[in-house]
Amino acid sequence: MDHAQHTGTTTWAMAAQATLHCLTGCAIGEVAGMVIGTAAGLHNATTVVISVALAFVFGYALTMRGVLRAGVGFAAALKVALAADTVSIAVMEVLDNLVMVGIPGAMDAGLTSGLFWGSLAGSLVIAFLLTTPVNRWMISRGKGHAVVHAQHHGHQHGHDSQPGHDSQPGHEHGHGHQHDHGHEHGHH
């Protein structure tokens, strides 16, 4: 698929859907890391490092799960996940950790504190809102989450798709097709 086709078909709904998919994996890792670090009484910097590492692990794992279910091999699925999610996860992690560190007392509030959980929830909402335009821009250029679709369509239809290039005309994002990689694009 060329640049013009991506630009014409990328909607805010598609970008939000891709961001929500990415945020799911990020949030699992981020929350787990914050809980582990806070419960263990680790230094804030150590807690952030654990949270970021787990966000990448869970973010990539969620994407890989669907790509693997589509019949793609492990090495190829890992490449797809890296191409599809790295920028999105990185942006989300910078944003939500800046919020967590920037709210006075949030990181030290403890697991039973509303400040801790409210700050964490707020940080994930901010990350979603500010990452969605990034994902829209990337998808419109055949990057980011568009790579998952290119790989899926190429494998499902027997074509050797290159990441970021959808070889199937008419199979652009957002047409309500179920792609069996953990979520559905289109209108709900």
Image (cartoon, helix red, strand yellow):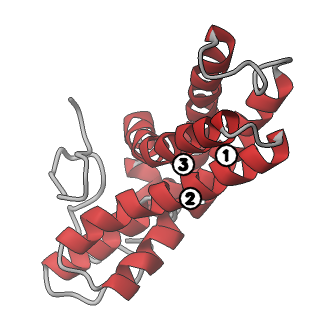
Residue 7 pos. (x, y %) = 47, 53
Vertical position of residue 47 compared to residue 149: above or below: above
Q: Foreground mark, 2 or 3?
A: 2
Residue 144 or 112: which is nearer the viewer? 112
Marks 2 and 1 in Cβ contact (< 8 Å): yes
Residue topped by disc 1: 93
Q: Residue at x 63, y 37 (%)?
A: 34
Residue 114 pos. (x, y %) = 62, 9
Residue topped by disc 3: 135
Marks 2 and 1 sit apart, C-alpha to C-alpha, by 9 Å
Marks 2 and 3 in Cβ contact (< 8 Å): no
User: The C terminus appears in which quarter of the rendering?
Assistant: top left
Q: Residue at x 45, y 69 (%)?
A: 81
Marks 1 and 3 sit apart, C-alpha to C-alpha, by 14 Å
Residue 75 pos. (x, y %) = 39, 87
Residue 86 or 185: which is nearer the viewer? 86
Of callouts 2 and 3, the N-terminal one: 2
Marks 2 and 3 sit apart, C-alpha to C-alpha, by 16 Å
Q: Quadrant of residue 169?
A: bottom left
Q: Residue at x 73, y 53 (%)?
A: 49
Of the residues shown, which amino acid type is indicated by label 3? Asn
Q: Quadrant of residue 54?
A: bottom right
126 relative position to 135: left or right:
right
Of the residues shown, which amino acid type is indicated by label 2? Phe
Of callouts 1 and 3, the N-terminal one: 1
Residue 102 pos. (x, y %) = 84, 26
Q: Residue at x 42, y 39 (%)?
A: 20
Tag 3's secondary structure? helix
| Tag shown at residue 56 | 2
Vertical position of residue 174 compared to residue 90: above or below: above
